[in-house]
Image (tube, rainbow, N blue to C red):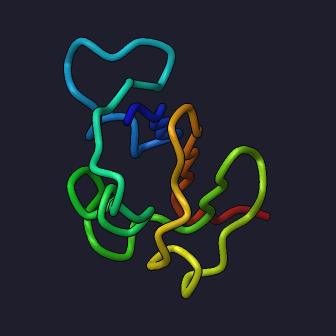
Amino acid sequence: MKITLKLYAGLSQYLPVDSKNHSTKLDISSSATASSVLDKFVPEGAAHLVLLNGVFLEPEERKLPKLKDGDTLAVWPPVAGG
C-alpha cells in the first residue's frame, strides 16, 4: 500500500533526495505503523507532532496499525520560541 510522508522544519533533511515539497510517497506493508515508518526516517525523539490525515496521534497510538492506503503522515519536530 502507498502513503505520503511529510516531514517539516528540520526533519525534511531526512527525506529521500528526490522528495519535493517536504513529502515523499512510500510503499509500506499493511502491518506498518506510524512508529515503524518514522523509525526509518526520523531520529528517535525528533518526531513531536504527528498527524495522520490531519488528526493528532498520541505517542501510544503511533504503535497501532492504523495506516491505510492513501493516508498522509505529517510530522514536525519539537519547537522552541517565545
Tell me the residue at 20%/55% (across/down): 40
Q: Is residue 41 above or below residue 66?
A: above
Image coordinates of residue 39 in percent, x first then y, are 26, 64
The residue sitting at the bottom extreme is 60
Residue nearest the observer in this picture, 6 or 30: 30
In the rendered view, does 19 fall on the left or right side of 65?
A: left
Residue nearest the observer in this picture, 43 or 67: 67
Q: Quadrant of residue 12?
A: top left
The number of callouts visible is: 0
Residue nearest the observer in this picture, 33 or 38: 33
Q: Is residue 55 above or below residue 45?
A: above
Tell me the residue at 45%/37% (across/down): 5
Q: Is residue 39 above or below residue 19?
A: below
Q: Quadrant of residue 60?
A: bottom right
Tell me the residue at 78%/57% (across/down): 55
In the rendered view, does 60 fall on the left or right side of 16?
A: right
Image coordinates of residue 36 in percent, x first then y, are 30, 65
* Position of the C terminus by quadrant: bottom right
Q: Is residue 51 above or below residue 27?
A: below
In the rendered view, does 41 fall on the left or right side of 55?
A: left
In the rendered view, does 18 fall on the left or right side of 81?
A: left
Image coordinates of residue 75 in percent, x first then y, are 54, 51
Tell me the residue at 32%/32% (across/down): 26
Image coordinates of residue 27 in percent, x first then y, are 28, 33
* Position of the N terminus by quadrant: top left
Residue nearest the observer in this picture, 33 or 54: 33
